[in-house]
Image (cartoon, helix red, strand yellow):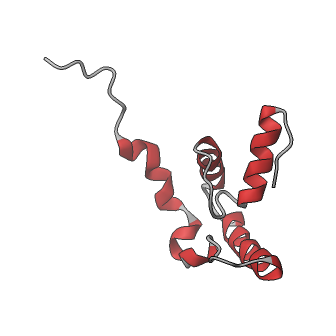
Amino acid sequence: MAEISRLPGPVMDLWEWQFEGACREADPTLFFHPEGERGAARRRRAEAAKAVCATCPVIEQCRKQSLSVREPYGVWGGLSEDERAEVLAQQSGRRAVV
């Protein structure tokens, strides 16, 4: 008989919080910058995405997940790519290169 004690738990239990995300009702392009977007346009889009995150009941779970998997793109848990890099750098005791 196969040893099942080492298998991961039900996947749904790990991701169910995502069903409660405020971003599920928002335009996904709000959270990910298009190629070549820079400066003020990028800041405005990111701030609009963060405004959605600010109303989200699962912002902490989202932020924790994005940091643990080192999500490289988009706004997750109210943090941009650069902000996540800074948090991760602080956690490791070094300065982020942004």
Is 88 or 60 nearer to us in this picture?
Answer: 88
Seen at 62% across and 46% down, the residue is 70
Camera-nearest residue between 64 and 72: 72
Q: Position of residue 92 (x, y in %)?
A: 78, 33
For this orientation, the residue located farthest to the left is: 1
Quarter of the image for residue 27 reads: bottom right
Q: Residue at x 65, y 55 (%)?
A: 59
| Residue located at (62% from left, 70% from top) | 31
Could you tell me if residue 64 is visible in this image?
Answer: yes
Q: Is residue 44 left or right of residue 76?
A: right
Total marks placed: 0
Name the image quarter holding residue 74.
bottom right
Q: Is residue 26 visible?
A: no
Position of residue 98 relative to residue 12, above or below, is below
Question: Measured from the top left, where is residue 17 in percent x and y?
Answer: 50, 52
Q: Nearer the viewer, residue 4 or 86?
A: 86
Kindly indicate the quadrant of the structure image that contains residue 22: bottom right
Residue placed furthest toward the bottom: 41
**For the C terminus, which image quadrant?**
bottom right
Q: Is residue 23 above or below residue 88?
A: below
Residue 49 horizontal/vertical position (percent) = 68, 72
* In this rendering, position of residue 76 left or right of residue 3: right
Position of the N terminus, as image quadrant, is: top left
